Image: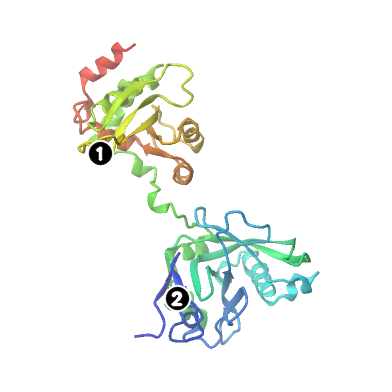
Amino acid sequence: MSAHGNRYVVNETYRSSTDPEKDQFQGWLNAPIDTGIRNSGGIRAIANPETGDREFLVFITSDGSTKNPNPWEDVINMQEGTARYWGDAKARHRPDPDEATGNNWVKTDYTETYAQGNRKDAPPVLLFEQPETGQVTFRGLCILTGMSIERHKDDDGETVVNYLFDLAILDTDAVELEWIHRKARTGRDIGGPDAWQEWVTEGRIRRYSVWKDNIRSTAAQQPAGRYGDLLQDIRTRLDGPKKGEKLEYLIQYLMEDLENISDVEMTADSGDKGVDLTGRIELLSETQLGGVDTAIDFKAQVKNTSSSISGRQLSRLASRIDDGEIGLFFTTSYYTKSAQEENLSTYPVRLFSGKDLVELLVQTDLADDATLNDAVVADIEDEF
């Protein structure tokens, strides 16, 4: 068994120790490499022992998750897959931030590879955060997307001229140490993460997102087969100038058919400000608890459209939701990626796409296989 681990996993924390048997940071990175990272500094590098080329840059930040960072603090945004990292210049280096060793490395690599579109020779960045002494958390594999010269005051009030580096955190959950060691020793870029290889070969930046497992593609939100036929039947038969209100009635009928939902009401035609239906969801429908309210109020928005639903539309509903309530958004179409990300990070709203809608309908008497029940359509038409 090797003396080092097999991989660094994003958001996992590792030991940083002077004891080689316990060290999972410098010891793992340097294991078979004579020209590995140094044991100090926020910016470090792993160089090829033959050519001296930096095959990897290693950035370490003491706190990348500050909620209200000072202008000179590093910021790591795992939600959007971005980071801003300050260089290692100090006041004594003023006015030339290149005098700081780490800054000089990064500037050279950025200007000679990244900025020139020479992606195959650009060193990837391994980003670590140090939450406390003796620990490092791996925040991901990154590429440099920009750099600028900025000024800020240090803790002693002295002006520091420094570089600010912009990073894209790539969409990979782990980085294999075998890839790091091979690339560092030989310069051969084989076995790297898919998101890294895509950037090298195509220039495409696929960013990491903590929401990625909950984001559905357009295709995943649209039904196929007989479910697709049912969605088309809904669009066809509930069409016309009042198509929005017709779908609202269908959703009302659907929710009234569900055992754990009660008090479903449509709002007035005007002035709803993003709310079409209200009601209550019983969280413990089969359990009786004396004196305890186990229901939660909801407000719902309904959109009968073939166009995508944006974050702006979700925000309209979210603005009407009071404390202790949830929102439900129903559409015959789908939600954009950015809308889903915005919703997951900000709003107490549950999203139902066209596929979700028909999957609910086929479990009721409102649908007959691939069509709406004729009686249901007639009842909806009678409402007008």
Relative to 136, say whether 317 is above or below: above
| Residue at horizontal 25 percent and vertical 15 percent from the top | 378
**Which numbered disc, 2 or 1, marks the residue that appears first in the sequence?**
2
Relative to 28, say whether 76 is above or below: above
| Residue at horizontal 80 percent and vertical 70 percent from the top | 94
Colour treatment of the image: rainbow
Q: Which mark is residue 179?
A: 2
- Image-quadrant location for residue 353: top left
> Is 36 left, or right, of 182 in this rendering?
right
Q: Which mark is residue 284?
A: 1
Q: Position of residue 195 (x, y in %)?
A: 46, 62
Judge by depth and name the residue closer to the eye, 245 or 189: 245
Q: Position of residue 90 (x, y in %)?
A: 73, 71
Residue 219 appearing in the image:
yes
- Label 1's element? loop
Instruction: Indicate the amino acid at tag 2.
Output: Trp
Q: Quadrant of the C terminus?
A: top left
